[in-house]
Amino acid sequence: MSAGLTRGAAAIVGVAESDLGEVAAGMSVIDLMAQGVAGALEDCGLSLSDVDGVFAAAGQSRMPTVALCEYLGVKPRYHDSTMQGGSSFMTHVAHAQAAIEAGLCEVAVIAYGSTQRSAGRKNVGPREYNPYETPFRPVLPASAYALAASRHFHQYGTTREQLAEIAVAARQWALMNPKAWEKTPLTAAEVLGSRMVSHPLTVRDCCLVTDGGGALVMTSAARAKTLRKPPAYVLGTGESISHLTISNMADLTATAARESGAQAYAMAGLTPKDIDVVQVYDAFTITTLLFLEDLGFCPKGEGGRFVMDGAIAPGGKLPVNTNGGGLSYCHPGMYGLFVLMEAVRQVRGECGERQVPGCETAIAHGNGGVLSAQSTVILGATSTL
């Protein structure tokens, strides 16, 4: 959704996680959202009375935006519960900017919460019967991503060793993030030797299962200049969907990130070479590889070779998932909001040991479903306007 939006007209001005990892008994997804909202408002120096736009998505709440508004005691002028899995939050950024530019709201919060680790599978309802998939008893979503990985291996010669490099890089970044769930080093041999989940993906090729949530605050560029922290301006946005079920994906090696990324670059007036930091949804190691290709950081089919020799690890040629990603930082059900948070913090220069020097631009890419819904946001510091 970039058509009609103005480059740099809105900015993300506050971000905060809720409790992460394994939350206290009795905590609900709305509790976690509210924690995030309170923290994000404190981050930028605004209060709940300033909020007139509310956006939320959740897999464990039937009407998350309405529930959050009731919990917070706010009645917004504008609200949105767009739900397309882990890419929902990048889409919310575009929708929030559209609402702000149209005068429908001035200060919007975007929130998420999940107790996936605590709840386990007891809150997961039965999946719809799919005659092309269900009889084969796939372990979803892992088997869907394993299918994409297998095809990439066959078509381009990608290897398990190359995917292992992605997991190792994520862990190296996580070791510099005090909030990361994983605190121990990881080697490629350990990735390759860990329990197989769905060939060719081992448990270390798969994201964490944690509780958690958070929120971010958006407002107009004019108001952003008056607030506590440096703004992360929305330079570009884009979104595209391609399928729902993996058996209906036209090309298992090419995602709709090609379209969402192209839209975001066009709005931002930038190219991949202009991006300082890359944050992509890494539910599985193969997603990092696919999105690096489809967002233009390397040619299609070259992703495996591109990530070798620490290329996306600390000190490498391209900083990718600098908080540790869904593979090592946290992954509470849907991870997209956390991709945006790290992009904001890198642009603001507040990531401490893992800060990328001179970071002025960051791309945050979200993935929903089984490579189904893609949404891209490009953020920039004041110097990029």
Image: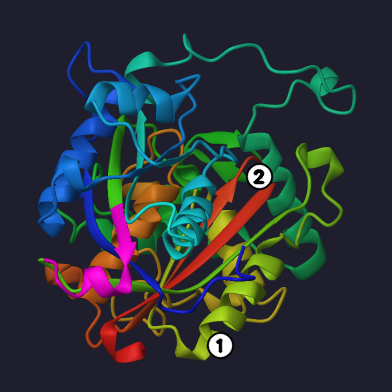
Q: Earlier in the sequence, mark 1 or mark 2?
A: 2
* Percent x, y of residue 29: 33, 24
* Residue in view at x 27 percent, y 84 percent: 382
Q: Quarter holding the C terminus?
A: bottom left
The colour scheme is rainbow
Q: Nearer the viewer, residue 329 or 376?
A: 376
Secondary structure beneath dot 2 equals helix
* Residue in view at x 37 percent, y 22 percent: 67
Residue 310 falls left or right of residue 83: left
Tell me if residue 159 comes above or below residue 325 in the rendering.
below
Tag of residue 145 = 2
Q: Is residue 21 magenta?
A: no
Q: Quadrant of residue 103?
A: bottom left
* Percent x, y of residue 104: 44, 52
Kind of residue indicated by mark 2: Tyr
Observer able to see residue 103:
yes
* Residue in view at x 39 percent, y 32 percent: 209
Camera-side mark, 1 or 2: 1
Residue 215 falls left or right of residue 103: left
* Percent x, y of residue 73: 23, 25
Q: Are marks 1 and 2 in contact (CB under 8 Å)?
A: no
Residue 208 falls left or right of residue 39: right
Tag of residue 271 = 1
Q: Quarter holding the N terminus?
A: bottom right
Secondary structure beneath dot 1 equals loop
Q: Is residue 219 magenta?
A: yes
Q: Residue furthest right?
A: 131
Tell me if residue 205 comes above or below residue 220 in the rendering.
above
Q: Which residues are magenta?
A: 217-227
* Residue in view at x 72 percent, y 73 percent: 301
Q: Quadrant of residue 341?
A: bottom left
